[in-house]
Amino acid sequence: MRQKKFILPESEIPTQWFNIQAIMPNKPLPILNPATREPLKAEDLYPIFCEECANQELDQTHEWIDIPEPVREQYTYYRSTPLVRAYELEAALGTPAHIYFKNESVSPAGSHKLNSALAQAYYAKKQGITNITTETGAGQWGGALSYAAKKFGLECAVYMVKISYQQKPYRRSIMQTFGAAITPSPSMSTRAGKDIITKNPNDNGSLGCAISEAIELAVTTPNCKYTLGSVLNHVCLHQTVIGLEAEKQMAMAGEYPDIVIGCFGGGSNFCGISFPFMRHNIQDGKKTRFIAAEPAACPKLTKGKFEYDFGDEAGLTPLLPMYTLGHGFKPANIHAGGLRYHGAGVILSQLMKDGFMEAVDIKQTESFKAGVLFARTEGIIPAPESCHAIAATVREALKCKETGEAKTILFNLSGHGFVDMSAYDQYFEGNLQDFEISDEEIARFIKDADDLNK
């Protein structure tokens, strides 16, 4: 019988995370203090983040960083996650390509986000912090952090983008079940939220707005720190457990990926699956392609601009060198709420600039069409975000069908869509719209970032 699923024994779960900053030919540009325009030091981030996360954020020296034993212990409850050969999807597409996916949907929170949530909650607890705050788009990160906070005895407050708060009520229920307090963003509970609502009472929110509110709450609340589920370097670091496992599992399958694909919002799951393999391109001359699949409604990599910008709408974060659509960008109300972010991570932006990765944009209906095909062939209903990675995989597999090349494709199934069924209902009813942003709109939103770089 052909082997379809590959799982590592507990002893083979990684004991260290991989820090790609240490081996990059061109290091990321420095993160800047917006007031002084001087490069940040780790201690500049201590008022917002846990000290260990701040130290990891700026670490460009250590290639390998130990996973704390209490975090690894929590990992063992759901890791290793399966690597699966998608034979039925291959057959449905009639492709000679070999398609594998890393199934991160099996975590207690239903997505890859728990890999960093557990680490950040642990570091907060170790430092003596009692409260943590965050934002969430679709709700996967909020759900993961709520679970992690409960595991380490912390109180958790989540600002959820208002349109997702309305579209995804069961994501709210998951966070509440794990004990978190949920607030739709923008809200009247922070100065940042009040300012946004004053300008536009019907504002549906954005990740940039929710970040502003969560940071404001963190810096104004005693013994409280802010946590982030994507974009930042320490988050990318924690997620490399995905690709490090996948390396060993691909070896078990007797193959090595020609193409690695992940959906792309701020970059957390994409870097998790890609960085461990990318190190072999950098150090060993491998030629694997790395494809980030972003929504056509929020195309920061394919249509954005590389420059310094704020990571949030109100301008409370440091200035980040990244591909951006402008921190005031208001994305369309697509169901892939986790991908509706205006910028890309600092490390990923530098790697994109240097040609180590590429990007494609996917329309909403194409992503759901691919997600339905995957569900009907592989038996897993994917999250709307993950559908973008599947759509990009389908594109590449069909190219193999045209050329006859039997390439090996690996993609990250970042989460399941079991609580996103209303989005699938809308797809089946023909009510989903495709949103694309014009060059004129992009230029209008990027102007604020351009002004910051003068």
Image (cartoon, rainbow, N blue to C red):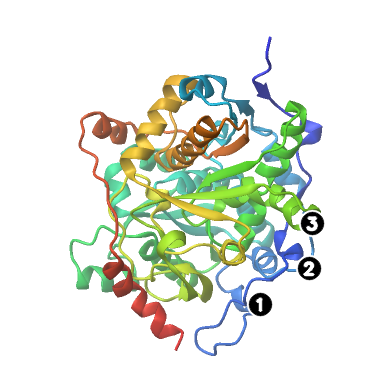
Residue that badge 1 annotates: 43
Query: Which disc number belongs to residue 61?
Result: 2
Residue at 39 percent across and 66 percent down: it is: 213
Query: Which disc number belongs to residue 33?
Result: none
Crowd band around label 1 with a 10 angstrom C-alpha radius: few (<14), some (14–19), many (20+): few
Residue that badge 3 annotates: 283
Marks 1 and 3 in Cβ contact (< 8 Å): no
- Residue furthest left as drawn: 201
Position of the N terminus by quadrant: top right
Q: Quadrant of residue 302?
A: bottom left
* Residue type, mark 1 in image: Glu
Identify whether 409 is placed above or below 318.
above
Q: Secondary structure at mark 3?
A: helix
Q: Nearer the viewer, residue 122 or 91?
A: 91
* Residue type, mark 2 in image: Thr
Residue at 29 percent across and 62 percent down: it is: 187
